[in-house]
């Protein structure tokens, strides 16, 4: 297989995958012809070349088996189902300065996205509500009331840095989708589905807000702290220099007084 660009899901390092760190193979299942036809398993493993990570990503696909007469072997055809074995979900590692409960809801939503999209949407909704309460300092009885208060803060110019009106519109939309999993319809026979793609959209909004709110604030605080540290260091150096000059002057005056 020719080399290709790839991003490690563990450390997010962009890198080139070659035969040195890639293993893939298709195994035909000799089961006879099922309702899918002949089938087999395709596994793909990639080792991260980042020495600080060195993790293994492993995916297994259940696929239609197609015989390639020219090569004299079975190859994978139409994919029927796929399993991500390592890592188990598509979540990105989030920094520890993001509150633990928010990270846990995010990781769990990613883990169950495909198995239970409605539950993933509910977790995403709870995570976003937690972000409003923690980052924006707004806590009321219901998410809808917290969103209204946050809109008011934006209108009054009191919202935290990074909180934009279009962000609140997206959170409000997610509130509605998350409610599908959190609350049953009055007519219990009315079933409203949430598909994995829709749940993924909610997860991606969380990732965006983690970056725009928490990561951006942390970087800003680090930069400001660095500037303040430099200023303090220079101030201390100036004070020390003045003290040395003053001591030198005192020594000169003392020498002159002693007639040296």
Image (tube, grey):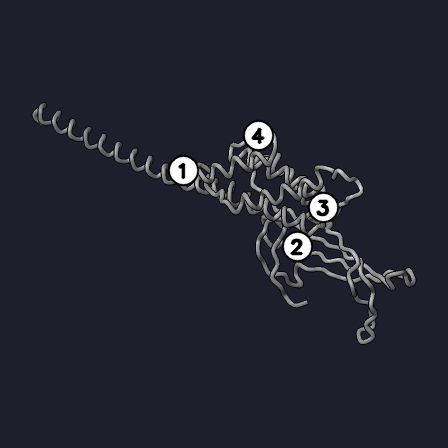
Viewer-side residue, 230 vs 91: 91
Residue shown at the point (60%, 55%) measured from the top left: 7
Circle 2 Cα neighbour tier, 10 Å, few/some/many (<14 / 14–19 / ≥20): some
Q: CA distance from mark 3 to mark 1?
A: 42 Å
Q: CA distance from mark 1 to mark 4?
A: 33 Å
Which mark is first along the chain, 1 or 3?
A: 3
> Contact (CB < 8 A) between labels 2 and 3?
no
> Contact (CB < 8 A) between labels 3 and 1?
no
Numbered disc in front, either 1 or 4: 4
Residue topped by disc 2: 47
> Could you say whether the residue bearing mark 3 is in a helix, strand or loop?
helix
Residue shown at the point (54%, 33%) measured from the top left: 134
198 to 243, vertically: above or below: below
Numbered disc in front, either 2 or 3: 3
Viewer-side residue, 31 vs 181: 181
> Could you say whether the residue bearing mark 2 is in a helix, strand or loop?
strand
Residue topped by disc 1: 225
Which mark is first along the chain, 4 or 1?
A: 4
Residue 34 position in % (x across, y down): 90, 60
Q: CA distance from mark 4 to mark 2?
A: 47 Å
> Could you say whether the residue bearing mark 1 is in a helix, strand or loop?
helix
Q: CA distance from mark 1 to mark 2?
A: 38 Å
Residue 224 position in % (x across, y down): 40, 39
Residue topped by disc 4: 140
Circle 4 Cα neighbour tier, 10 Å, few/some/many (<14 / 14–19 / ≥20): few
Q: Quadrant of the N terminus?
A: bottom right
């Amino acid at each position: 297989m020719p080399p290709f660009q790839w991003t490690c899901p563990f450390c997010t390092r962009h890198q080139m995958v070659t035969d040195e760190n890639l293993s893939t193979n298709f195994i035909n299942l000799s089961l006879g012809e099922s309702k899918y036809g002949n089938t087999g398993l395709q596994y793909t493993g990639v080792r991260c070349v980042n020495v600080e990570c060195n993790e293994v990503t492993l995916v297994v696909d259940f696929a239609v088996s197609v015989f390639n007469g020219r090569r004299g072997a079975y190859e994978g055809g139409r994919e029927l189902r796929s399993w991500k074995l390592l890592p188990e979900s598509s979540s990105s590692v989030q920094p520890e300065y993001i509150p633990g409960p928010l990270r846990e809801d995010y990781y769990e939503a990613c883990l169950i996205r495909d198995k239970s999209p409605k539950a993933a949407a509910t977790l995403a909704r709870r995570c976003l509500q937690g972000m409003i309460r923690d980052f924006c300092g707004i806590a009321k009885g219901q998410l809808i009331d917290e969103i209204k208060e946050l809109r008011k803060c934006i209108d009054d110019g009191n919202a935290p840095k990074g909180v934009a009106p279009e962000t609140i519109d997206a959170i409000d939309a997610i509130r509605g989708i998350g409610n599908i999993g959190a609350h049953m319809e009055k007519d219990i026979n009315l079933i409203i589905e949430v598909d994995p793609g829709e749940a993924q959209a909610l997860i991606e909004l969380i990732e965006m807000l983690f970056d725009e709110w928490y990561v951006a604030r942390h970087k800003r605080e680090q930069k400001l702290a660095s500037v303040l540290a430099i200023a303090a260091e220079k101030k201390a150096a100036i004070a020390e220099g003045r003290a040395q000059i003053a001591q030198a002057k005192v020594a000169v005056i003392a020498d002159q007084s002693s007639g040296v």
